Image: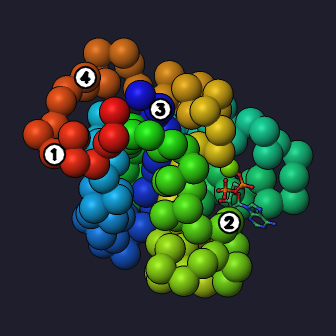
Amino acid sequence: MERTFVLVKPDGVQRTLVGEIISRLERRGLRLVAAKFMQVGRDLAETHYAIHKGKPFYEGLIAYILSAPVMAMVWEGPNAVAAVRQTMGSTRPTEAAPGSVRHDFGLEVGRNLTHASDSIENGEMEVALWFKKEELVDWQRDVDRWAFEN
Ligand code: DAT
Ligand code: MG
């Protein structure tokens, strides 16, 4: 089953949107695999955003992710990566589709509420970076046969 890594960033936590965002992913039909409420440290932040190192927004991005706790999660389901990216919306809230989290709750790219893996490979890498194997719960849900075709 395809898995993806999701973060409710510090602004989402401070704005008490953790439950709202989890609820949207649950209602989409995705299945929760792991969740951890935590204060991120600099090493983890820099590894997670290594691809953006050197970009003009990098320092601000690191400061943002360190600025308050986050809710780190793994979700799974058919096409989980694309489904979650769609539920979150485009990087810039003013370009995000109406009905997406970033559209419905955001205004600025530097306060865009969530992170979600952008490919299956990055999803696997990010899940491994943020979670230990034993923190990932392998389980069946009674509604799975109604949410997943196979
Ligand atoms: P996404 O989070 O949609 O995957 P990304 O990987 O391109 O977007 O960038 C990571 C984060 O960096 C993004 O959520 C917000 C910030 N960011 C990206 N581009 C930015 C820009 N031009 N100005 C300020 N922050 C930016
Ligand atoms: Mg990204």
Q: Is residue 16 above or below residue 98?
A: above
**Regarding mark 2 in the picture, which secondary structure is present there?**
loop
Indicate the amino acid at tag 4. Answer: Asp
Choose the circle earlier in sequence order: 2 or 3: 3
Indicate the amino acid at tag 3. Answer: Glu
- On the image, numbered disc 4 is attached to which residue? 138
Indicate the amino acid at tag 2. Answer: Thr
Q: Residues within 10 Å of mark 3 (few under 14, many from 20)?
A: few
Farthest top residue?
134
Where's the N terminus, which quadrant?
top left
Whether residue 67 is visible to the viewer of this picture, yes or no, is: no
Q: Is residue 43 above or below residue 61?
A: above
Whether residue 48 is visible to the viewer of this picture, yes or no, is: yes
Choose the circle earlier in sequence order: 2 or 4: 2
Provide residue 4's location: percent of width, then percent of height: 49, 38
Please tell me which residue is depicted at 55% across the width and 62% down the height of the picture: 86
Choose the circle earlier in sequence order: 1 or 4: 4
Choose the circle earlier in sequence order: 4 or 3: 3
Please tell me which residue is depicted at 22% across the width and 40% down the height of the picture: 144
**Rounded to the nearest whole Å, what is the CA distance between mark 1 and mark 4?**
15 Å
Q: Is residue 20 above or below residue 130?
A: below
Q: Which numbered disc, 2 or 1, marks the residue closer to the eye?
A: 1
**Regarding mark 3 in the picture, which secondary structure is present there?**
loop
Please tell me which residue is depicted at 50% across the width and 53% down the height of the picture: 83
**Rounded to the nearest whole Å, what is the CA distance between mark 2 and mark 3?**
22 Å
Mark count? 4
Farthest left residue?
142
- On the image, numbered disc 1 is attached to which residue? 143
